Image (tube, rainbow, N blue to C red):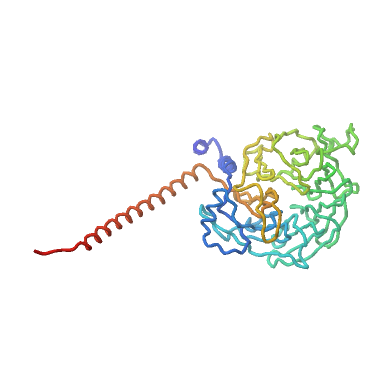
Amino acid sequence: MNSQLLKRSLGVTDSQALQQAETTRLLHALQPAPEVQYDSSNENWEDVESHASEAVEGVETRVWAHRAGVNCLEIDRFESRYLLSGGADSSIHIWDLEAVEKTTRSCVYHPLGTVRKSSLSHKFGVTKLSFYPFDSLAFVSSSYDHSLKIYSTETLEVSASFDLGSVIYSHALSPVADHLLVACATQHPAVRLVDLRSGASAHSLAGHSGSILSVAWSPHDGNILATAGSDGTARLWDIRRSAGCLGLLDLEDSVGNIGDTASKKVSRPMDRLKAHVGACNGVAWTDDGDYLITTGHDECIRTWSATTGANTLSHFGPTIKNANLSTLLPLLAPSYLTVPGTQIMFYPNVNEILMFDLSEGTLFKRLKAPGIALAQPRESTGQRNIRNRVASLAWRSGHIELYSAHSDGVIRVWMPRTKEDANVEAEELEDATGVMDEDKNRKRKRETLNELYRDLTRQKLTFN
């Protein structure tokens, strides 16, 4: 950091480069923050600090956000203040991230509002939550109960509900389009597009031969959609075209067969073009829209050119794990936080989070949450122990904060902790210890004087 400040003072680098160097350093310093907790258990804590100290030591506490497990997270993109969490018990919580000031001491958040199971809400677990792209006063939720619902953020009441007739694994709203089409990934092999303006299903995109597990709109073109399915294929669509599908991503193609190369002859049959050997359950775009990232049951992460569909052949190593049918999405840190040409990706790898360089596939860090690998049994509900896995990731824009949803019911926060922070905390601890030692010395001296006084007063005085 001192070298960057020197370069800036000499005019070698500009202020933006200095800021990116500092934010990159903070990204690499991300650590679990167990003292920040999200609690909806409605239990009365007698000693919050003692429980926080237990979390630091790696002992699971009784605090949970959703008792049956947290399935998904979403943070509003306008104020970066409100967090939505969806549970396996069909409940939805909204949290105010500014309700409590985050410090080095313990802080516990409680839900600002809750959507509980009722005749109007979801019946089964929530699979995805999304704020409206142009207004955070409403959000969309999907569930295993086949329904897509619209909620008011202020009242948490259902504004509209759509029954799609099959399990909805995920959904997506375009952040740039003029339309309000929700692309839904369902058990049905056709992509369902629901128009929120008309309240009807606009049309379907047919092409997959199995369940669709993930969908993602292009960040720059509101008509381009990427999908991934259980048939192992990843497809690009233009919803304005009658044919729809622009092309398929092929793991053996490092040249590309989409866009300008579409007219070139494809040497392999279309039905054999696979993005992954096994189900493909995740697809995401980079911020600039130039690349796509897919995840699959072959335990591989692949990056693709969005222009040509070419496999960039980036290799992310043998540590990748992926076996669940549910949507598994990597999270990309905002590109403005890192130097140009590099981008950091976070991958939910069962019970840990892997931090990669997206372009090179280099593993920077393994973020492991404090605690045990198995969720504790719920005595009141009689649930079995389930493996504690990371179900979803969310980034708080404008901050260096990563949020993760876990199947043990906990929402965990990851914040930077640099060497400077550690030194400051050590000095504060040393000062506090010094004050405590001084108080102990005073107390010991006072007790000694009291004992001397008592001994003197107990002696019998005789006069000759």
Instruction: Check the image and report above or below for 452 versus 423.
Output: below
Tally of marks: 0
Report the quarter where the C terminus lies.
bottom left
User: Is residue 379 toward the left or the right of residue 140 in the image?
Assistant: left
Instruction: Check the image and report above or below for 152 versus 144.
Output: below
Give whichever of 355, 436 is nearer the camera: 436
Query: Dividing the picture into quarters, in which one does residue 280 lie?
Result: top right
User: Is residue 264 toward the left or the right of residue 436 in the image?
Assistant: right
Q: Position of residue 427 (x, y in %)?
A: 43, 46
User: Is residue 181 toward the left or the right of residue 423 in the image?
Assistant: right
Which residue shows up at 39% across the image and 53% down it? 436
Which residue shows up at 60% across the image and 52% down it? 60
- Residue at the extreme left of the image, as rendered: 464
Residue 404 in view: yes
Q: Position of residue 171 (x, y in %)?
A: 78, 53
Which residue shows up at 74% across the image and 55% down it? 128
Q: Position of residue 351 (x, y in %)?
A: 67, 45
Give whichever of 82, 112 is nearer the camera: 112
Residue 76 in view: no
Q: Position of residue 385 (x, y in %)?
A: 69, 52
User: Is residue 431 toward the left or the right of residue 161 in the image?
Assistant: left
Query: Dividing the picture into quarters, in which one does residue 131 lie?
Result: bottom right
